[in-house]
Amino acid sequence: MRTRSLAALLSFTAGFVDTAGFLGLQGLFTAHVTGNFVTLGAALVLGTHGVLAKLLALPEFALVVGLVSLAAAALKQRQWPAVRLLLAAKVVLLAAFFALAVTLGPFADSDTPSALLTGFAGVAAMAVQNAVQRIHLGSLPPSTLMTGNTTQLVLDAVELARGTDPGQRAAVRGRFNRMFMAIFFFAAGCAVAAALFAWIGFWCLAVPAVIGVASAVLAAES
């Protein structure tokens, strides 16, 4: 039960932070590297803001993932609670994202130093979440890769519909349910973030910071 709840919170957080960042930082995706390639191309063609932010997001994301990998190995060697500590670090970054956004925003140009600093806090937080999930929570559906999740969901749905082998049916159904919940909570995070951003702007980023605390607690208990 705690594992399913953790998966739901991670997916909701990813959808929420990605949407709020996109709306407030001129199309910057904090958790979706592919999206930044697309919006970078659009910004170059259309001459809109955000080129520098999108160019720097990828190397920053990769750097943070590498640092998390090293930190995870060091924590494991010392037999410290790696998942709890790394998710706590994500909470700190989400809190920084929130504080910087409400203090320095709104941003008419996401390539200004204040906007870059704010965006990098959000990207770093989501890089930590992605890395922790890959390293320590591999049994959970990816919380940001909804294309892959949707593909697997459809494949499992077809297999269940056409009558899969009885010995594999339970496993396929279980995977289908996990993928469905990941997609559902990611979409819910997107919807809630859009509504709250339209209402209170960057103050909505307090929500993922609080949910991050809950995720760290659940991970420690799982």
Image (cartoon, rainbow, N blue to C red):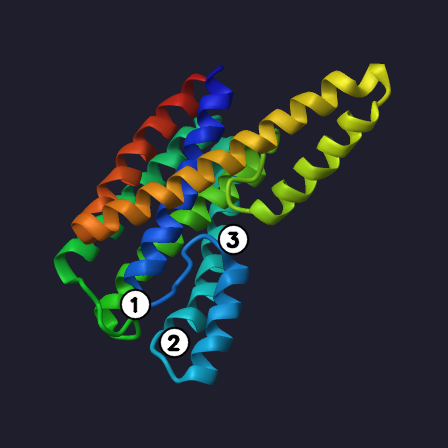
Q: Residue at image x 22%, y 49%? A: 98
Q: Is residue 156 left or right of residue 215?
A: right
Secondary structure under tag 2 reads helix
Check residue 52 in the rendering and tell me which mark sits there, or answer none: 2
In which quarter of the view is residue 60 placed?
bottom left
Which of the marked residues, 1 or 2, is nearer the chain's N terminus? Answer: 2
In which quarter of the view is residue 162 placed?
top right
Residue 131, given in percent of the width and then of the height, sits at 51, 44
Check residue 140 in the rendering and tell me which mark sits there, or answer none: none
Contact, mark 1 vs mark 2 (Cβ under 8 Å): yes
Q: Amino acid at mark 3?
A: Gly
Q: Amino acid at mark 1?
A: Leu
Q: Residue at image x 73%, y 32%? A: 156
Check residue 66 in the rendering and tell me which mark sits there, or answer none: 3
Residue 124, given in percent of the width and then of the height, sits at 39, 53
Which of the marked residues, 2 or 3, is nearer the chain's N terminus? Answer: 2
Residue at the far left: name it: 103
The residue nearer to you, when weighing 13 against 212, is 13
Which of the marked residues, 3 or 1, is nearer the chain's N terminus? Answer: 3
* Depicted 82 relative to depicted 42: above or below: above
Distance from the alpha carbon under mark 2 to that under mark 3: 22 Å
Secondary structure under tag 1 reads helix
Q: Which residue is mark 1?
A: 116
